């Protein structure tokens, strides 16, 4: 069966209408105010696509391909990015809510997270080398055996990263973030 190939289209459903995508490849498409919550997006390929003000919470992402995808002002609760197609997996997030999502074991170097909430998000065994967390809230985010080489956390808050359990060589942190690196030692940091 032939795969649908959709390019250079903008999808804007009418109020309250749920958008159902055909399985296929979407290239250079824009999705505005779309509700994909609890939808099955498995096997769909998104290349150079932008999602603006969309709800993707609890969508199924088995072998979904995101290549240079951009998410702006999106609600993305409980997503399992670890089930996405790994080849070329790359995206950028701005002003998104990614709480309770998992990136377990993904290789997503140079990913940019800006003004986003990543509460209880799992980054275990993830390669986040050279990624930027710009003004993000990382309350209870999990970093376990995570590659954070040259990652930048200087403007983010509430992270807890064990330097002995994660590779953080040349990663950047602010002085205010020191407690998040030293918490396991139960020491008091005073100014």
Image: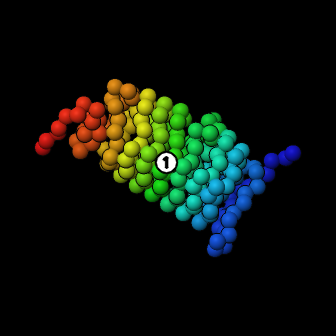
* Rendered image coloring scheme: rainbow
> Which residue is farthest top?
164
> Which residue is farthest left?
191
Q: Position of residue 23 (x, y in %)?
A: 76, 51
Q: Quadrant of residue 63?
A: top right
In the rendered view, tell whether residue 156 sits above or below residue 11. above
Residue at (31% x, 44% y) in the render: 154
Q: Quadrant of residue 67?
A: top right
In the depicted view, which residue is nearer to us: 134 or 7?
A: 134
The quarter of the image holding the C terminus is top left
In the depicted view, which residue is nearer to us: 140 or 170?
A: 140
Residue at (64% x, 55% y) in the render: 38
Q: Position of residue 40 (x, y in %)?
A: 69, 51
52 sits left or right of 187 in the view: right
Q: Position of residue 102 (x, y in %)?
A: 52, 42
Q: What residue is shown with label 1? A: 100
Residue at (34% x, 25% y) in the render: 164
Tally the marks: 1
């Amino acid at each position: 069966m032939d795969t649908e190939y959709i390019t250079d289209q903008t999808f804007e459903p009418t109020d309250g209408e749920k958008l159902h995508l055909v399985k296929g490849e979407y290239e250079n498409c824009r999705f505005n105010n779309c509700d994909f919550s609890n939808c099955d997006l498995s096997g769909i390929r998104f290349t150079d696509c932008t999602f603006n003000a969309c709800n993707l919470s609890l969508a199924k992402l088995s072998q979904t391909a995101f290549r240079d995808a951009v998410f702006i002002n999106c609600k993305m609760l409980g997503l399992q990015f670890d089930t996405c197609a790994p080849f070329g997996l790359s995206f950028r997030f701005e002003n998104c809510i990614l709480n309770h999502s998992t990136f377990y074991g993904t290789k997503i170097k140079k990913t940019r997270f800006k003004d986003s909430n990543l509460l209880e998000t799992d980054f275990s065994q993830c390669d986040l080398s050279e990624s930027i967390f710009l003004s993000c809230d990382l309350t209870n985010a999990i970093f376990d055996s995570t590659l954070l080489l040259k990652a930048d956390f200087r403007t983010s808050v509430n992270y807890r990263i064990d330097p002995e359990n994660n590779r953080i060589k040349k990663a950047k942190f602010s002085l205010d973030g020191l407690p998040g690196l030293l918490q396991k030692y139960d020491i008091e940091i005073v100014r």
